[in-house]
Image: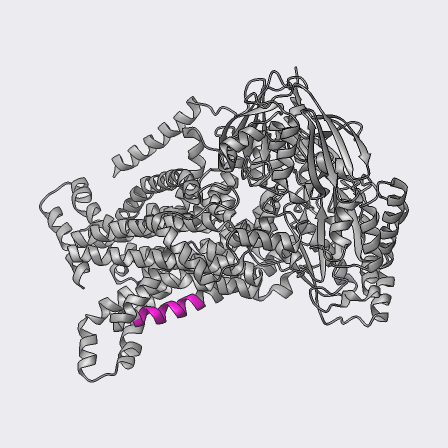
Amino acid sequence: MLRGERKGFKKILHRMGQARIGMAGLGMVSFVVAVALLAPLLSPENPLEQDLIARLKPPIWEEKADPRYKLGTDPVGRDILSRLIYGARVSLSVGFLTMSFSALVGIILGVLAGYYRGISDSIISNCVNIMMSFPYILLAISVMAATGPGYKNLVMVLGLTGWPIYTRLVRAEVIELKSRDFVTAAKALGGRNSGVILKHILPNLASSIIVLATFELARMIIRESFLSFLGLGIPPPMASWGGMLAEGRSYMLGLWWLAAIPGSAIFFTTLGINLMGDGIRDWLDPHTRNR
Amino acid sequence: MKTFRKSFIWGFFILLAGIFIFPAQPYAGPKGKLVNALSTDISTLDTQFHNIRVNYIVGWHLYDNLVYRDQKTMQIGPHLAESWRLIDDNTWEFKLRKGVKFDNGEPFNAESVKFTIERGLDPKCPQRPTVSWIKEVKVIDDHTVRLITDKPYPVALERLSNFQMLPAKWLKEKGTEYFTTHANGTGPYRLKEWKRGVHIILEAKEDYWKGAPAIKTIIFRPIKEIATQISELLTGGIDIVRDIPPDQIPLIENSGIARISKAPTLRVVYLLFDADGRAAKSPVQNVKVRQAISHAIDVDTIMKTVMTGNATRTAGVLNPQHFGYDKSLENPYPYNPEKAKQLLKEANFPFDQPLRLVTYTGSIQNPRALVEAVAGYFNKVGIKTNVNVYTDIGMWDRLGREGKQNDCAIHSWGSGGVYDADALYYNYFRNGQAFCYGSSPEMDKWLDDARSTMNTETRKKLYHNTGKYINDQALAVSFWAQHAILGINKRVIYEAPPDEFLRTFEAKLKD
Amino acid sequence: MKSYILYRLFQALIVVWGISLITFSLLHLFRDPALILLPPEATKEDVALLRKEMGLDRPLIVQYFKFLSGMVRGDFGKSFVAQRPALSLVLERMPMTLWLAASGLLLAIIVSIPLGVLAAVRRNQIHDHSASVLAVLGQAMPLFWLDIMLIIIFAVKLRLLPASGAGSFKHIILPAAGIAVSLLPILMRLTRSRMIEILSQDYIRTARAKGLGERAVLFRHALRNALIPVITILGFQFGMLLGGAVITETIFAWPGVASLVVESIFNSDFPVVQAAVALFAILIVLANLLTDITIAWLDPKVRFG
């Protein structure tokens, strides 16, 4: 018996355990999505309303807390819990939109490069290399400087810098797939290129792309907080986790909750996404499926 | 597999043991050493080719100015210049101190003064405005020099209190590029080492003409992140942190190792309207709208909460410490949101259009909380806002200069250590100046006259008129004068400077 | 083989050129250094004069060719802020960033490879799951938050390590740890998945059937082959390290070139930005090139496929 192989009942339990991580991740992400969707119902206060007198109150379990603001207040007296809940909307939407945009561009370019090869491949591959070696901070700062910070500009900048990784992956896989028998067969049977691409190539790319996109989603959320760190994130008064975290980082030593709370939210969400991604990958990957 | 795990765990413990066996040495160790944190590294040792506060701070340790403001009396007194007089309205004569030498032995004399000023008049020089009022420098003898001006310039001494004297011969020999990385001054310290991005080490001069300073070694460490600066202060790695955020005051005071030192500074914070519509057509061109907004902002509450009480009200935008300040001009529009709403209705304010509200980080304390609090007050009277915080001073300056700072901009102005209304009013309310967004021909005349007469009574009256006009027309909403909040290690005897120039060459260490 | 290398070198040059072009455009279209150098009191004439002195009033194409010809000779001009040759400023601080990156990478490898192997061998058992979670921690935390936490825990609360700066071995531990944690997930995951793939392959079964000890199987056959894609990833990770370096250098006051670059971008100090970006591009491209050549040498399929 090979190491790691199991028999009978143990096998079933083991299979369920295998899925456990992914399920945990899915659960976490679903929770956050639910919070984001139900924000108006869940949020106790208006996340934009200021209460200067009650500014910087600690969470409810601390001494000087204000019972009205369960997780404390920020530097202008806004309820942190409410901002946390609405922040879920911003972080998730930014992450999802950027991921979709990058994935779309990346897949198209990757297929073009991998399927047609030749000049388009050279151009696209060089662009990919340039973009990947290019410090995106420079791009972000310069574009933001010209257009000004804002939700739309943020999504645009993140989207513009996220596509190369998809292209690289897709291109490599398309090249490999193209050489496989079933594609050659399809073409021999007289299929047009676009048909071959749509019916045979793309479906086989799906699993890799889904896995990559999942991890990229988490990365985009972290990137948003990085841009907030540089002062280029979502401008006030909109509540975003990255913005709250960047704002709270100078207070980590005294007013710890200002950073800890949004930080935990980011952590929880990206952890969930990553675990979910791990689970999806293990599930879709034929190598690992049967063990 | 077991061996894998074992070696891993062993390795981890050995690493940990190593850390314990060699405990961390704090940076500032024995007596005779003082460590300052700077928010950025100095850009150059050339005292004239920069525009940055931290460069001035280090520069003042290495070089001297002609005159010096005594920190106790706040009066300008002699420094490298022993005495001065006005020969006529346009001629200043300075008698220079004898026997002062630059670090390399070159004597300080009238030639040094002439050379320094002429170098500063170079159109490329960022500090040109400090001496642009000087038409000609005449050397009378080795220790007498005359400054000739076009028109009488009342703020001359103030300007000269921040213009470091340079060694003519040495600079001519070595050239400007050498100067960017080397120092040769008459000041209390000499440069021992400058490792870019790491530290600047200064060593006291035993034979300094004013008497040797009390601390042997002063070190400046550039640390951008305030959380790190505070961490270093709390662990004894840094002795002085210049800008403690007001909300962190309790943390420092309860730390046991450091204390807080506060002082009202010359820097004022205020909201400037694009009253002239310089950037674009704007509702704030209507005086009623500006008055409404003035009534809508509860400045006192903001001072008490966001600024944690560490602020002093200003009048007509001026700081109580400015010459020309008039307390009677304080608070022309008391907080009254109802009146504000009424005025807005009268002015037919377009409520569907958001107003732009901008500010920048770097000089203002708690800028984000401040601008958001102000935006909150706008919102309370129905005005929608579009907030933008610029983290890039270059960008901020550029937008200001190009006339793009609409509709309401929260500014701050440090006046460069010049305790005179001219330093503020001229820049912001004289038509044609880079940052002027609200002007009038009357103000132009008052401001021009005020800076070309030596008569203090006349000047006071002219500045009173200006301030009153600003109030009546609500060209700006006066907020407050900022208080410097320094975190200082308890072993250091030094207090916060009122003009933001850190003078640790005057500091002492306990016992 | 030779033609492959030449081709890749040519590609590398294009990349470096492309990057310098983009950098140039971004900087010149969006910023104006004359304004950062002059005080706010300066008049419009002062600004115009300074721009003329700096050569900023010439048409963009002219400026670009001047820049390009300089770049080829290694002359990026003088830093506007420091008035010293930009390239020497960048070269001065580059070693510190490289040291930070290398230490972080080394630490990441030391931890992630054993973890990855462990996770692969003990697949789907508790070792695997906990290793996964551990690795994912690195991707779920914004680096600046992690760095500040490290300072708070290890410097302020425990007083074990210095809070910032560079100078002794103790100063590199926290900064490198931060970087390592951010690299951990990818390296560990990759090692794990490659090890899993390889362990299921025939030649491993053969080796086992031949009666080789488990350790020999692991080391001599599996690990070596598993590391190939890991090496590939390292090349491309180098580019990502810049982002991590920016944060780490800012927070730990680490005197490297990454924080210099960001400062220079904000200060519109074009020469420094261009010098740094060009240098980084060259390094990244070289790193990728080296790894690609190594792989091509080991695996002929890549060369001709």
Who is closer to the viewer here, C233 or C91?
C91
A109 magenta-colored: yes
Q: Position of residue A108 (x, y in %)?
A: 36, 72
Q: Is residue A193 left or right of residue B454?
A: left
Residue C107 showing in the rendered view: yes
A28 magenta-colored: no
Q: Is residue B125 left or right of residue B182?
A: right
Toward which corner of the image does residue B29 lie, by quadrant? Answer: top right
Look at the picture and state if A282 lies above or below B346.
above
Label the magenta part by its dominant secondary structure.
helix
- The magenta span reads A101-112
**The C terminus of chain A sits in image quarter:** bottom left
Q: Position of residue B17 (x, y in %)?
A: 39, 25
Q: Is residue C293 left or right of residue A65?
A: left
Look at the picture and state if C210 lies above or below B491.
below
Residue in view at x 37 percent, y 67 percent: A106
Q: Is residue B298 left or right of residue A141?
A: right
Toward which corner of the image does residue B503 lie, by quadrant? Answer: top right
